[in-house]
Image (cartoon, rainbow, N blue to C red):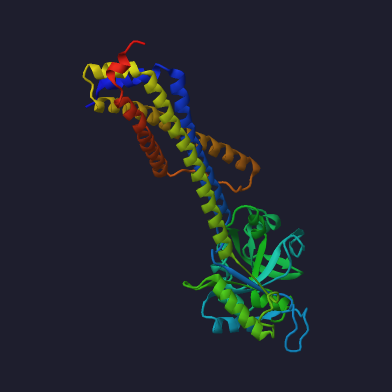
Amino acid sequence: MIDRDAWQEVIQALTSNRLRTLLTASGIFWGIFILIVMLGFGNGIEGGVKRSMKGYATNALYLWGSETSVPYQGLSPGRRIVLDNSDSTAILSEIEGVGHLAPRVRLGRYRSRRDVSYANKVTDAEVSGDLPGYENILPMAIETGRFLNPLDQARKRKVAVIGERVHAELFGEDVNPIGKQIQIRQISFTVVGIFKPAHYGDDRERMSSLVFTPLSTFQQVFNYGQDIGFYAMVPKPGYTSREVAEEVKALLRQRHRVAPGDARAIGDWNTESEFIRIRNLFTGIRAFIWTVGVATLLAGVLGVSNIMLIAIRERRREFGLRKSIGATPADVIRMIILETSALVSGAGILGLLGGLIALYVIDLFTRSITNDAGSDVLFSTPTVDLKIALAALFALVLASLLAAVIPARHAMRIDPVEALRVE
């Protein structure tokens, strides 16, 4: 049952000093508001970074040959390590933890050559020789046609899979290039597929400018012999990228007569370490957000407790009169708790709604900027888990009620005679 008289008294008590009530409520409002906005911003940044890394295998590993830095077995330092097809066979046969292996070789860096042409049109592209299994390392969406297949590799077919940017610049977006011949350094390749990168952000344009050809074909027509530029691989389940990298580097050092302690001869990089760094970074960001948010809320709770103490001192005569006409200590405590809960709950709910509205406006503003710029940004929809938000609000109300116990006990101990005495 709702005690109307009790709530009317609560409303009257809160409105009797509007300025004090407003200032107290504003502390609670801004505490919840800031916490919700900060959580939303943190989730938006985290979502944007994860979106920009979409399509990358979270445990992909890359290795390449570099130069030796120390002499070994009579060989001088500065020797260039060139990987080849026999290294691929050795890795697959001797390293248990390798799940997918993709030996790769590239014709040119991004925007460094104008090797790819069709009719009288030329485009900057990065041409590479790859195996069909590269799809397992760099996921992509095939828009038209297909990717490389084992027969392309076995028969050394002159076929190519082109990115959406290459398609648009050579043929136009409305022209289907499947079956048409493009020129790569004056050598004809038949287009068999168009792919769309699964990436976002700055890396997307580079990925859409790739041209994939079979590794065997690439090595033959461009006179690369058996050479491999670098390896991309994914470990089997249960193996980490770091473990597999150390095993593969040890094998390659042995095969190419490199000193065991030579860290420069075989270079490596893995996405697993980057993902761990990013995960730890956002763990720290979330901890910082909660620390600031909780500190702000605690400041509001302490403010409520202090304000209630001041209010009780000003209302000593009122409480003395109530007790003199039969009000019990429990009645006095209940009244203080009702006033505190009404003040904190009302301000907290307004802060929660204000924070959600602010995140909605920020989302609309961000989307408008992204659409106008025509590119992806490292910021996604700022969202907040409603369960977490409500739990924070509940914890705030509970903490405020606990903080109100001290003022309530002070009101309960007021002596009616002393309170009603005329000074």
Is residue 387 depicted above or below 103 in this figure?
above
Nearer to the camera, 155 or 416: 416
Give the image location of residue 292, x and y in percent: 52, 42
Residue 169, picture quadrant = bottom right
Is residue 369 depicted above or below 206 in this figure?
above
Give the image location of residue 268, x and y in percent: 64, 71
Q: Viewed as shown, does residue 56 lie left or right of 4?
A: right
Residue 353, picture quadrant = top left
Is residue 250 depicted above or below 234 in this figure?
below
Give the image location of residue 278, x and y in percent: 56, 57
Residue 163, picture quadrant = bottom right
- Residue at 68% x, 79% y is 83
- Residue at 51% x, 37% y is 34
Q: Viewed as shown, does residue 142 lie left or right of 348?
A: right
Q: Viewed as shown, does residue 331 lie left or right of 152?
A: left
Q: Is residue 142 visible?
A: no
Give the quadrant of the C terminus: top left
Residue reaching furthest to the top: 422
Q: Viewed as shown, does residue 241 lie left or right of 125?
A: left
